[in-house]
């Protein structure tokens, strides 16, 4: 298995231009992602914002509630209109009292392509192997759905034990 | 999210319950986190997992974790060396699964956002 990288592919029933705007326009990005961003995305510059409830899913908005107002930061890497948008960030840096600036970041890339009936969006996040193991564990603990997650971990642990 | 009615037998659930209960304590969670980062470690090194924790106190917590199979130990002289019984790879994979699930949720929100025509 690849322990450094996640890839997601989805065909969206929308024009390429519409998808491009939804990811590269910081105000639109914020509406589905659940973040309020100050100013536009500019290649090579940091974009700052705060976590706000997503407008498109009330259940997720509820889960986000404990994190409302928490700082959200990315460093925009590349903006290639209609093709590619990428940024670096600290995956799930949710503890506002902690300074994450010296920690390694992952790279998130959104890539667009034509697809039958819409637009193919490929999202990759890479660089996880540079994130210290304990940070990965803490990131999971800090999740509001931590217990559901914990139970999944335990389920896997039990399955591993049974295989021995 | 875990679907409680999917993929786990009553037997597994009854085995999981004591593990939940063992982890439902901040000191024991801290011990597990410390062992996952730096383990195996001697008992004395785990005292720092909580302020004012005595050797006796940490031993008690370790035995609770040992009883449910989350840790085990080897005798080293007069002390014990403790290690987590979860394979590190499982934790790594689990982290990626979790990040991956976050993206699935975000993508569904993006889909709703671009496909609803507003």
Image (tube, helix red, strand yellow):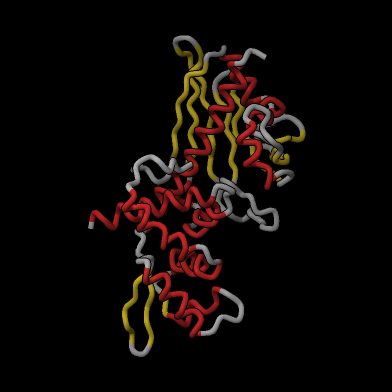
**Does residue B89 appear in this view?**
no
The residue furthest top is: A117
Front-most of residues A47 and A94: A94
Q: Residue at x 56, y 66 (%)?
A: B26
The answer to whether A93 appears left or right of A106 in the picture is right
The answer to whether B30 appears left or right of A44 in the picture is left
x, y percent for residue A109: 53, 32
Q: Residue B83 occupies which quadrant of the picture?
A: bottom left
Q: Is residue B56 above or below residue B25?
A: below
Front-most of residues A157 and B15: B15
x, y percent for residue B5: 40, 40
The residue furthest right is: A38
Q: Is residue B78 above or below residue A58?
A: below
Q: Residue at x 47, y 75 (%)?
A: B61
* Quadrant of the image containing the C terminus of chain B: top right
Front-most of residues B42 and A106: B42
Q: Is residue A138 above or below residue A15?
A: below
Front-most of residues A24 and A97: A97
**Does residue B74 appear in this view?**
yes
Q: How many marks?
A: 0
x, y percent for residue A20: 60, 20
The answer to whether B83 appears left or right of A46 in the picture is left
Q: Residue at x 37, y 52 (%)?
A: B13
Q: Residue at x 35, y 64 (%)?
A: B85
The residue furthest bottom is: B78
x, y percent for residue A57: 62, 30
């Amino acid at each position: 298995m690849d322990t450094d990288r996640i890839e997601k592919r989805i065909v969206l029933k929308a024009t390429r231009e519409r998808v491009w705007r939804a990811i590269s326009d910081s105000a639109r990005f914020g509406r589905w992602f659940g973040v309020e961003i100050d100013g536009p995305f500019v290649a090579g510059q940091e974009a700052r914002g705060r976590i706000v409830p997503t407008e498109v899913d009330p259940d997720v908005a509820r889960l986000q509630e404990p994190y409302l107002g928490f700082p959200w930061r990315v460093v925009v890497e590349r903006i290639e209109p209609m093709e590619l948008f990428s940024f670096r960030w600290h995956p799930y840096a949710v503890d506002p009292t902690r300074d994450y600036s010296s920690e390694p970041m992952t790279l998130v890339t959104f890539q667009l392509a034509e697809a039958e009936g819409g637009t193919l969006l490929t999202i990759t996040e890479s660089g996880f192997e540079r994130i210290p193991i304990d940070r990965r564990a803490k990131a999971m603990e800090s999740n509001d759905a931590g217990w559901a997650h914990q139970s999944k971990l335990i389920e896997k642990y039990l399955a591993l034990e049974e295989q021995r | 999210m875990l679907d409680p009615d999917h993929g786990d037998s009553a037997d597994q659930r009854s085995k999981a319950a004591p593990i939940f209960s063992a982890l439902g304590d901040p000191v024991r969670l801290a011990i597990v986190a410390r062992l996952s980062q730096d383990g195996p470690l001697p008992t004395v090194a785990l005292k720092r997992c909580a302020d004012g924790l005595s050797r006796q106190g940490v031993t008690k917590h370790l035995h609770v974790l040992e009883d449910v199979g989350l840790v085990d130990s080897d005798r080293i002289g007069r002390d014990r060396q403790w290690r987590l019984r979860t394979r590190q790879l499982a934790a790594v994979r689990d982290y990626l699964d979790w990040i991956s699930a976050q993206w699935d949720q975000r993508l569904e929100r993006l889909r709703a956002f671009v496909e609803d025509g507003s």
